[in-house]
Image (spheres, rainbow, N blue to C red):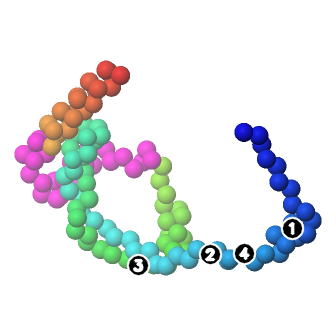
């Protein structure tokens, strides 16, 4: 199929430039920041030990405008590597949450099984 080139006459170009375009804008309302309790999780990518997860129950809620929220968090952004919670810290959090160690063991066993099956699949590729 041949390439078709269309050129506008000067009058058509002027008409196109003068046409009214709808104003497009974006507005943001307030942000709601909720803090959740932490609990024993089930994510298989936890490195050693049991993973953490958020509880469905939130413990606090704070509303702010987007500008206030962004102003507060501008200096608190952390690199991805700092967001990983070390095993020792996860153990402390789970103990504070009174999580039975029997549940830890069960979750850790499930995670090891999933990780092994993933390794087998990756090796087959």
How many other residues sit within 10 Å of disc 3, few (<14), some (14-19) or many (≥20)?
few
Which secondary structure type mostly characterizes the magenta part of the structure?
helix
Counting residues from the start of the chain, the first of labels 1 and 3 encountered is: 1
Q: Nearer the viewer, mark 1 or mark 3?
A: 1
Counting residues from the start of the chain, the first of labels 3 and 2 encountered is: 2
Judge whether residue 41 can be spotted in this image. yes
Which is more toward the observer, 19 or 9?
Answer: 9
Give the x, y percent position of residue 17.
83, 70
Judge whether residue 92 can be spotted in this image. no
Give the x, y percent position of residue 66.
51, 74
Q: SS of the residue at dot 3? A: strand
Distance between the alpha carbons at the discs numbered 4 and 1: 16 Å
Distance between the alpha carbons at the discs numbered 2 and 4: 12 Å
| Dot 1 and dot 2 residues touching (CB under 8 Å) | no
Q: Is residue 22 above or below residue 12?
A: below
Q: Quadrant of the C terminus?
A: top left
Quadrant in the rendering for residue 24: bottom right
Magenta highlight on residue 51: no
Q: Name the residue beneath numbered marker 1.
A: 12
Residue drawn 42% across and 48% down?
82
Q: Name the residue beneath numbered marker 4.
A: 21
Q: Name the residue beneath numbered marker 2.
A: 25
| Boundaries of the magenta span | 80-106
Q: SS of the residue at dot 4? A: loop
């Amino acid at each position: 199929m041949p390439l078709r080139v269309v050129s506008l006459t000067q009058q058509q170009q002027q008409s196109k430039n003068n046409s009214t375009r709808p104003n497009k804008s974006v507005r943001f309302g307030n942000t709601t920041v909720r803090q959740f309790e932490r609990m024993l999780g089930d994510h298989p990518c936890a490195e050693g030990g049991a993973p953490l997860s958020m509880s469905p129950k939130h413990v606090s809620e704070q509303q702010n405008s987007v500008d206030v929220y962004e102003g507060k968090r501008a200096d608190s952004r952390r690199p991805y590597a700092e967001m990983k919670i070390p095993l020792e810290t996860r153990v402390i959090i789970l103990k504070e949450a009174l999580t039975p160690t029997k549940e830890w063991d069960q979750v850790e066993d499930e995670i090891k099984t999933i990780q092994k099956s993933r390794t087998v699949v990756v090796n087959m590729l």
